[in-house]
Amino acid sequence: MAGFCAAYLFQMNMIQMCSVAAAAMIGSGAVTFKNGLIMVAGTGDVINIGLTITLAILLIKLIGNKLGSYTTILLPIIVLVVGGGIGLLILPYVKTVTTFIGMIVMAFTKLQPLLMGVLIGMSFAAMIVSPIFSVGIAVAIGLTGVASGAANLGITGAAYTLGIMSYSVNGMGTTLAHFIGTPKIQMANMLEKPKLFVPVLLSSALSGLLAAIFNLQGTPNSAGFGFSGLIGPLAAYAKMTPGWGSIILLTVLYVVYPVALGFFMRWLFIDRLSFAQAEDLRLEV
């Protein structure tokens, strides 16, 4: 599906979209061959899916109309074999990188709680605006307890900061999509202008710190979502004493504080220091 959607964004036809999707499936590593059977397990490596999709789209652009009337027959084969094949070849190396990132995050969980909260908050904020699958990392290493809560608040802080810093150039719906949906929609802008990581990481560090201070907890399945779908707040509430006190605390941590933090980051980095511009975060929708 990811390959199909990516190809659609490049205004490709049905044959091209299906070719990209097939290459992505092969490059994901989810498809295996065993005892003469084709088996599909899980979603595969998300980072490698992205790389394979990129290769497949570039290959299609390179081929263009050179195949003529044979396009319908040859294009899917070429894209699947070359694009998917290269994706499959680089898969072990990409998995090594993903595993290494997981090991670093796991090491953070063994640190003093306040420092752990800061570092994990920053780590997951960086992941959520990059090609790295934050949920996959959290589940893979079994991130739980306060570490999970810090990851959630770190992502939440990043989401609100990006949304508020860019609200003047993006519509209300797009602004809300940063935290109701996912801040990953800013990935292209973040990678194009790495300086934008500074306010994002600062806000996520301060947010992760609060998770440690207030003993905010979560589960491996909730750690990589932040505020999206209320998954983070609901998982945290399940670990707390039921009542209005817990609801008010979660409202402050997941709404009031990150909103205030977002406006502070906008004032500091855009209005005061002119370090960045709202235009840097414009999204074309």
Image: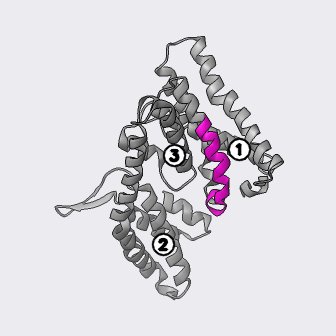
The amino acid sitting under disc 2 is Leu
Q: Which label number is shown at residue 123?
A: 3
Nearer mark to the viewer, of 2 and 1: 1
The amino acid sitting under disc 3 is Ser
Q: Position of residue 121 (x, y in %)?
A: 54, 39
The 10 Å Cα crowd at callout 2, few under 14, some 14 to 19, many 20 or more, is: many
Q: Secondary structure at mark 3?
A: helix
Residue drawn at the location 61% of the way across and 68% of the way down = 10
Magenta residues? 189-206
Q: Is residue 193 above or below residue 117?
A: below
Q: Which label number is shown at residue 113?
A: none
- CB atoms of marks 3 and 2 within 8 Å: no
Q: Is residue 268 above or below residue 111?
A: below
Q: Which label number is shown at residue 55?
A: 2
The 10 Å Cα crowd at callout 3, few under 14, some 14 to 19, many 20 or more, is: many
Q: Which residue is mark 1?
A: 163
CA distance separating discs 3 and 2:
27 Å
Is residue 194 inside the magenta stretch?
Answer: yes
